[in-house]
Image: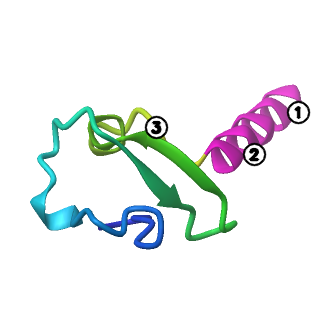
C-alpha cells in the first residue's frame, strides 16, 4: 500500500484493512519522508495526503496565481 508505515503499523497488514476503515494508522511520505497519522478511509478517499506535500502544493498554486 502506498505510504504505509510498516514500523508504526507493525501488528497491522495493509491488505487486511478495509478501504472505509476509520482506524488511524501511520503513513510515510515517499517524497519527503514525513510521518503522519490518518484514517485508512481518509487516505483511500483522497482526503488526507502528506501534510508537507499539501502545504508545498498550496504554496506553488498561490505563487502561480500571482503571476
Secondary structure of the residue carrying numbered label 3: loop
| Magenta region | 51-67
Q: Is residue 29 left or right of residue 58?
A: left
Q: What quarter of the picture does the C terminus occupy?
A: top right
Q: Which mark is residue 22?
A: none
Up-down relation of residue 17 to residue 42 (above or below): below
Q: CA distance from mark 1 to mark 2?
A: 17 Å
Query: Which residue in the structure is indicated by mark 1?
Result: 67
Residue 4 x %, y %: 39, 65
Query: Which residue in the structure is indicated by mark 2?
Result: 56
Residue 57 x %, y %: 69, 43
Q: Is residue 17 magenta?
A: no
Up-down relation of residue 30 to residue 27 (above or below): below
Secondary structure of the residue carrying numbered label 1: loop
Q: Is residue 55 magenta?
A: yes
Sequence-earlier tag: 2 or 3: 3
Q: CA distance from mark 3 to mark 1?
A: 28 Å
Residue 37 x %, y %: 50, 44
Quadrant of residue 35 within the rendered picture: bottom right
Residue 22 x %, y %: 26, 32
Residue at x 64%, y 42% (from the top left corner): 51
Q: What quarter of the picture does the N terminus occupy?
A: bottom left
**Nearer to me, 17 or 53:** 17
Image depth: mark 2 or mark 3 in front:
3
Image depth: mark 1 or mark 2 in front:
2
- Label 2: few (<14), some (14–19) or many (≥20) C-alpha neighbours in 10 Å: few
Quadrant of residue 56 within the rendered picture: top right
Q: Main secondary structure of the magenta part?
A: helix
Query: Which residue in the structure is indicated by mark 3?
Result: 48
Amino acid at each position: 500500500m502506498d505510504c504505509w508505515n510498516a514500523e508504526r503499523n507493525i501488528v497491522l497488514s495493509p491488505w487486511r484493512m478495509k478501504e472505509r476503515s476509520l482506524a488511524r494508522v501511520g503513513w510515510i511520505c515517499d517524497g519527503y519522508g514525513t510521518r503522519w497519522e490518518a484514517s485508512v478511509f481518509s487516505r483511500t478517499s483522497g482526503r488526507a495526503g502528506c501534510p508537507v506535500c499539501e502545504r508545498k502544493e498550496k504554496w506553488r498554486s498561490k505563487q502561480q496565481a500571482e503571476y
